[in-house]
Image (cartoon, rainbow, N blue to C red):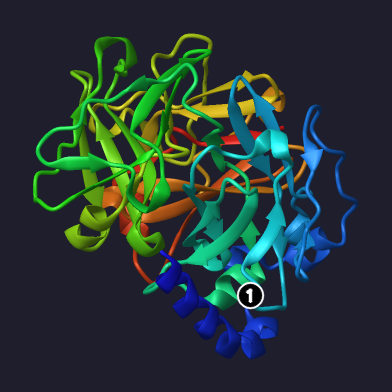
Amino acid sequence: MSATLTRRLRRAAAAAVCAAAVALPVSLASAAVAQAAPRAPQTAGFTSLKLLNGWKNSPYGTAHAAARLSSGIVQLKGAMSTSGTAAEAFVLPKADRPATNVYTNVDLCGSTEGRLLVEPSGAVVVETNDESSSWSDAQCFTSLDGASFARSASGFTSLKLQHGWKNGPYSTSKAAVRVINGIVHFKGAIFTGGTNVVPFILPKGFRPASNTYVNVDLCNAHNGRLDIQTNGVVTVNVETTWAQAKCFTSLDGATFARSGSGFTSLKLINGWKGKAFGTATPGARVINGVVQLRGAMATAGTNTEPFTLPAAFRPASTVWVPVDLCNAHYGRLWIQPSGTVSVQVNTETSTWADAQCFTSIEGVSFAK
């Protein structure tokens, strides 16, 4: 991974000069106004993070960068930007540092995929996809909302890998799973020299009530997903090539609701329909101040707003979080304090047809 990071930093220096010209999608035409708006107070229990190396807080009306530890899970919130080339954005407080390296995906400018490398020292480094994004995308906008990871293996059940898959590439932890308040949390990372796409089968206590699809990070910050069936069979899907999953598939930050218990169904609008491909009805639930979404949807139309969040589930600041689209393509949700939710796609790697076909909101989370 260090060689990849070095390449990115070299590319970052070349990209820095164009950072000022980078803009978010057309749908954010009012962002300049939003950016100047008063910032909402931090969610209870979150600790503000001291940004380093020229990184700054709250672009486009988002919250300050912050972290919270709850039930062994570190949840991040907020967003940041920079005009510089330093990839290290902050150092986590000791209480929030992982026992091993963690890689978890995050959203960048223009709905491009990126990731955070979180080291046991607490250093947090922003990395970009080596094909579909550039350092200027991270400079313009790096969202922390939705990013989470387990601090240690305490309370987790190890997963039995099969078909040649192996644990712990690049100093990550072993693949494991835990249920907390009805939400299944993964941890660790895996790799393989083979072509079998099924790395493990979830034990019965960790299986979803409906088919489930969640984003995961692959080699060099490429996008992938887990296809999790009700019988526990888990398949790794890739957006581009299988080599990226073989090299590295991170489970850190991947979550899903085991059932609909405690969730409030979301009223879909503008022609959007739920239960796409046997998935759950879209729903929302608040757990210790964090909103967790569930389910998936599809549409034959062109309206990007599938639902409006009820007041109880609305964030205090604007939020952007990654979502999975058709054929493991990358997308995101733009969630406004008014409750308005929009689906956005990365126009370099996907099209609106990918969102129409399938948009999974399973595993999406953000701090209120």
Q: Position of residue 22 (x, y in %)?
A: 63, 79
For the N terminus, the image quarter is: bottom left
Q: Position of residue 238 (x, y in %)?
A: 24, 53
Q: Do we see residue 340 in this rendering? A: yes
Task: Indicate the secondary structure of the residue bearing disc 1.
Answer: loop
Q: Position of residue 36 (x, y in %)?
A: 87, 62
Residue for point 47% across, 9% down? 261
| Label 1 environment density (alpha carbons within 10 Å; few <14, some 14–19, many ≥20) | some
Return the residue nearer the eye: 273 or 90: 90
Q: Which residue in the structure is indicated by mark 1?
A: 23
Q: Is residue 175 above or below residue 131?
A: above
Q: Is residue 261 above or below residue 143?
A: above
Residue for point 55% across, 27% down? 292
Figure quadrant of residue 175: top left
For the C terminus, the image quarter is: top right
In the visual, does 176 lie left or right of 2?
Answer: left
Q: Give the amino acid type for the residue marked by disc 1 in the picture.
A: Ala
In the visual, does 212 lie left or right of 287?
Answer: left
Q: Do we see residue 298 in this rendering? A: no
In the visual, does 123 lie left or right of 242?
Answer: right
Residue for point 74% across, 49% down? 65
In the visual, does 67 lie left or right of 102?
Answer: right
Q: Position of residue 228 (x, y in %)?
A: 26, 30
Residue for point 74% across, 60% down? 60
Return the residue nearer the eye: 305 or 158: 158
Figure quadrant of residue 173: top left
